[in-house]
Image: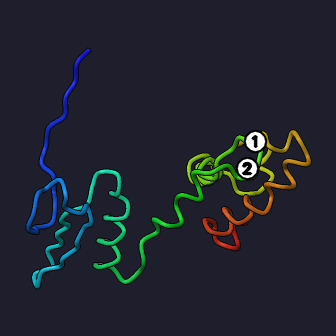
């Protein structure tokens, strides 16, 4: 099998050979509100998006908080934080017990449930209004 990739390198304008140019990016906001992101590289798209969002909104980007959801909820537990969030948003979980027993099965091992409970509580607190918990 053969493969190839071709495309433009979106580098910032600078003198010298393109191989030597930095892969940093720049976010510009024009007077008419047009946002332009120049430079960067494919693997830093989250940082580029975060910088763009931070420039045009009053609230900071949530990007830095999101990687926490992609990690296991506790050492040795095969459940990711995003699975708990999914349980609340898309499966109707309203309690920690619901998340741990019916959405993830973590409650089958009481010691694991005790370790995951604070994380599950924080997910519920961040998503559900107080009166609904």
Residue 60 located left or right of residue 88: left
The residue pinned by badge 1 equals 102
| Residue 58 in the image: above or below residue 46 | below
Q: Position of residue 93 (x, y in %)?
A: 68, 52
Q: Position of residue 84 (x, y in %)?
A: 65, 51
Dot 2: what SS? helix
Find residue 56 and report its horizontal and vertical position in percent: 28, 78
Q: Identify the image quadrant of the C terminus.
A: bottom right
Q: Nearer the viewer, residue 26 or 130?
A: 26
Residue occupying the point 24% across, 63% down: 22
How crowded is the residue under tag 1: few (<14 C-alpha within 10 Å), some, or many (20+)?
some
Direction top: furthest residue: 1
Q: Tell me the residue at 58%/49% (across/down).
A: 86
Tell me, for residue 49, which label it has, or none.
none
Left or right: 25 with respect to 51? Answer: left
Quarter of the picture containing the N terminus is: top left
Q: Identify the residue under disc 2.
A: 99
- Quadrant in which residue 23 is drawn: bottom left
Compared to residue 4, the image places residue 20 above or below, namely below
- From the top left corner, tell me how far across and down residue 18 is, in percent: 13, 56
Q: Secondary structure at mark 1?
A: helix
How are the colours assigned in the image? rainbow
Q: Residue at x 16, y 60 (%)?
A: 11
Viewer-proximal residue, 38 or 16? 16
- Name the foreground residue: 84 vs 31: 31
Residue contact at pointers 2 and 1, CB within 8 angstroms: yes
């Amino acid at each position: 099998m053969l493969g190839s990739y071709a495309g433009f390198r979106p580098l910032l304008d600078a003198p010298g050979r393109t191989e030597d140019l930095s892969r940093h990016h720049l976010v510009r906001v024009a007077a008419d509100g047009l946002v332009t992101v120049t430079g960067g590289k494919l693997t830093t798209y989250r940082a580029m998006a975060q910088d763009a969002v931070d420039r045009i909104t009053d609230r900071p980007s949530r990007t830095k908080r999101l990687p926490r959801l992609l990690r296991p909820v506790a050492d040795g537990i095969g459940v990711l934080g995003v699975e708990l969030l999914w349980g609340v948003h898309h499966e109707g979980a309203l309690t920690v017990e619901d998340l741990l027993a019916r959405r993830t099965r973590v409650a089958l091992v009481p010691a694991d449930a005790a370790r995951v409970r604070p994380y599950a509580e924080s997910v519920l607190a961040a998503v559900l209004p107080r009166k609904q918990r």
